[in-house]
Amino acid sequence: MEKSKLEPQNMADDNIALIGELFPDCITECRDEKGNLRKAVHMEKLQQKFSHVVTAGEESYDFTWVGKKAALVEANTPTNKTLRPVVEESKDWDTTENLYIEGDNLETLKLLQAGYQGAVRLIYIDPPYNTGHDFIYPDSFMMDDDAYAWGTGYFDEDGNVNYSRENNEAAGRYHSDWCSMIYARLMLARNLMADDGLILINMDEHEIANLQKICGEIFGESNDLGTIVWDKRNPKGDAMGISCQHEYILVYARSRSALTKRCRMQRPKKNAEMILKKAAQLFARIGEGNSLEEVNAEFASWIHSRKELSGGERAYNRIDGQGNVYRPVSMAWPNRKKAPDEYFVPLLHPLTGKPCPVPERGWRNPPATMKRLLEEGKILFGKDETTIPNSKYLLKDNMYEKIPSLLYYGGSDTEMLAQMHIPFDTPKVVNICKEHIRSFTGEGDIILDFFSGSATVAHAVMEANAEDHAGRRYIMVQIPETIREASEAYRQGYRNICQIGRDRIRRAGEKILAETGAEIDYGFRVFRVDESNLQEVFYSAQAYTQSMLSRLVSPVKEDRTDLDLLFGCLINWGVPLSGPYRSTRIDGCMVHDYNNGKLVACFDEKMTEAVVKAMAEKKPRRVVLRDDCFADSVAKINVMERFRCLTPETQIKVI
């Protein structure tokens, strides 16, 4: 039984809805006196509807929403959070260069600014789609459904649903919160991209228009490399209008000019290796009584039977006398205007010695290039001089192709995840991610996904590395979203999505190793976003009195370990978190050596002369010590002077 609502009817909302039916472009969003998002009427636009002339007011091209300025402020506000190592949840902690970070991605992006600015080659994200009330950013993580509904404004202050159920999925969707969420994060993400870096963003129809405007503002319209339309071959059955069966992948560069110097925006031909392998098998039969003509006939028939081949791949349907797979390509001048005079020199047929016809607008290449192609045997002549020659394109020299704007893939990885015992709905597709990773990244590149979900990108990076051994590294970031009790994942023992993601990486690594035997980095270091390692007095001194300070014996919180302090210093100093380190006990003190002596730290209370000398002998770039390890100011000065004498170039930090 549904309870009766006793509250009076909101006439203002009804009137706004009526205006929206007549003039939908005049409906906008604003915050009321309590800060809640509400629908509102854009009065200036409405006034213009009833005027034959331009109404007063300045016009400018601008894309804005409620909360845009606040989102910009939020992106620029420093954080006092830190990343705490979680060794027990990691895999191959001592040797891996991959990172898995659990926590709010806005805080994480801020924490990565110093150490990874300009270091990320590819950002590949699948942010939450704005389907009305199903994304949890930027609310507090780890919330139940009711708290989530309140946080997203699904209910008003009286506990009533803001819009009717009929309208909630369409007209009732708030765009401002979603735009603010993605805007702040993309602002920070851009700083992490290398000059020749890219970002790929998956999106559906609900926010694609807004996302394109936001990306145009943040990355610049000149750095828009295009949008891939992903036809998923599965129309949405609950659509009220046209049933959408596609999604989008936006592709933007940090700097188009820098990118084009390194990358030609190409992908490996998907079936090229299979075609070459089949051609080699058939060519080997020539010595067994088969002629080249018979082999070519069988090869062409095989090519025609392969439904998975693209039109461009089908064109490579011939084998030459050396076993090379090739296709003929026109050598005609490609432009409408005629080529220069020197591009009209005829070619002599190799058998008749007579000149062959020249294309109407001339050759594509100058005489010097034509001569080289002749010498290399890369020009195809007809039976006699009556046929215009073509260029001979070898498949082995053309193993890559341009990335098309259309992607046809209707499958999913649900079955594969089920075989890996990973319960996760609607994961990204590994093969699609891998294709883009191989197309856009290379040796040692860093790939970042700060909406990691089930960690598909990490899975794809490992598969790509297993295939080409490029040694790519990944950084996964995921908020520990709570698993619903009614889900299969909860029944399997998972309590948040990060647990699923880490298990998926482990099992995917085991699967790839078993299938390929590739010796790649299957590990990952886990970090968790947490409050600062230092006492709060260092961030909010005004809240503490003199009497309270006497109780703060140490500036470091009691629950923090040496490893917490070490990596906290790395973040503050802007040092990447994936470097090698080892710990050694010297004269009763634990000395930490990070990145082969570049940073040395000791957090023990009593440091001896032997410890100082051992640390200084490493000639480190930086040294980190605890402030309370010194008996008094004199002892601190003596240690500092000792370091300056032994290694004057070393920077010393005391926490």
Image (cartoon, rainbow, N blue to C red):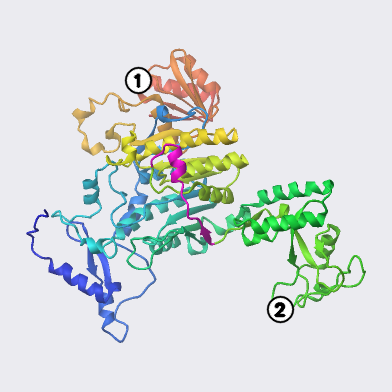
The crowding category of the residue bearing disc 1, from other C-alpha atoms within 10 Å (few below 14, some 14 to 19, many at least 20), is few
Residue at image mark 2: 337
Q: Quadrant of residue 44?
A: bottom left
* Vertical arrangement, residue 512 with respect to residue 78, above or below: above
Closest to the camera, between mark 1 and mark 2, is 2
Residues drawn in magenta: 405-423
User: In the displayed structure, does residue 165 sit left or right of residue 125?
Assistant: left
User: In the displayed structure, does residue 443 sit left or right of residue 356?
Assistant: left
Q: Residue at x 45, y 44 (%)?
A: 415
Instruction: Tell me the quarter of the image containing the C terminus.
Output: top left
Q: Residue at x 87, y 72 (%)?
A: 385
Q: Is residue 529 magenta?
A: no
Q: Amino acid at mark 2?
A: Lys
User: In the displayed structure, does residue 194 sit left or right of residue 82?
Assistant: right
Residue at image mark 1: 632
The crowding category of the residue bearing disc 2, from other C-alpha atoms within 10 Å (few below 14, some 14 to 19, many at least 20), is few
How far across and down, in percent of the image, does residue 62 sit?
38, 68
Task: Say which element carries label 2.
Answer: loop
Q: Are the two marked residues, 1 and 2, in contact with CB atoms closer than 8 angstroms?
A: no
Disc nearer the start of the sequence (1/2): 2
Task: Say which element carries label 1.
Answer: loop
How far across and down, in percent of the image, does residue 537 sit?
27, 34
